[in-house]
Image (cartoon, rainbow, N blue to C red):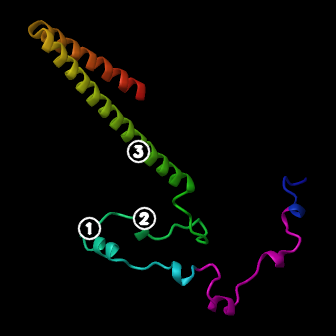
Amino acid sequence: MESFFPLSNTVPAQPDALIQPKSAVDAAEPSSFEAPPSRQEKPSSVTEAKTHGRKRGRKSTKNFPKQTDLTGNEPISLSTDDDVETDEKICTHDLNEKKLLNDVVETLDRVYDLSKNQMDNEANQNEPAARKRLRSMSTERLLKHTIDCVSFFY
């Protein structure tokens, strides 16, 4: 009766090459995978303050230990180039938004000045009727222009 898994396929060709016992000399030497001295954890005043219950300053990822992969060999980068690009895009977007809002405010100031000048000019010609009509119309024009400006920018 044949077995499901033949033994000839499961036995490695060179068993001594795969299993290497660790000698006493190898155990005494430091591992080649240890972090260099510059990457070892250094205590900082912020982390020490946190251990005593006091908090100083902002929390930062710089104070936390380095992240490593499962084998502990290489540090894993927590930030990527994409994060930096999105931060720059957000800043650029904020600047553009501020510029657009400043343009809207300037436009509204100009409209207000123009409508006030127009109201003053017409009021000088026929004061009671013109002033009453222009007060209601300038508000409507100002509102319409404001809506047009805001909808144009968004």
Which kind of residue does numbered mark 3 sit on? Leu
Which kind of residue does numbered mark 1 sit on? Lys
| Pointer 3 or 1: first along the chain | 1
The residue indicated by pointer 3 is 95
The residue indicated by pointer 2 is 61
In space, the residues marked 2 and 1 are separated at their CA atoms by 15 Å
Residue at the outermost top position: 129
Left or right of 25 in this view: 78: left
From the image, state whether disc 3 or disc 1 is nearer to you: 3
Badge number at residue 12 = none
The residue indicated by pointer 1 is 55
Left or right of 139 in this view: 107: right
Task: Tell me the element at label 2.
Answer: helix
Residue at 52%, 78% in the rendered image: 39
Residue at the outermost left position: 128
Task: Tell me the element at label 3.
Answer: helix
- Quadrant containing the C terminus is top left
* Residue 114 in picture, x, y percent from top left: 26, 23
In space, the residues marked 3 and 1 are separated at their CA atoms by 33 Å
Which kind of residue does numbered mark 2 sit on? Thr
Label 2 Cα neighbours within 10 Å, binned few <14 / some 14-19 / many ≥20: few
From the image, state whether disc 2 or disc 3 is nearer to you: 3
Q: Is residue 154 visible?
A: no
The quarter of the displayed image where residue 56 is located:
bottom left
Q: Which residues are magenta?
A: 10-34
In space, the residues marked 2 and 3 are separated at their CA atoms by 27 Å
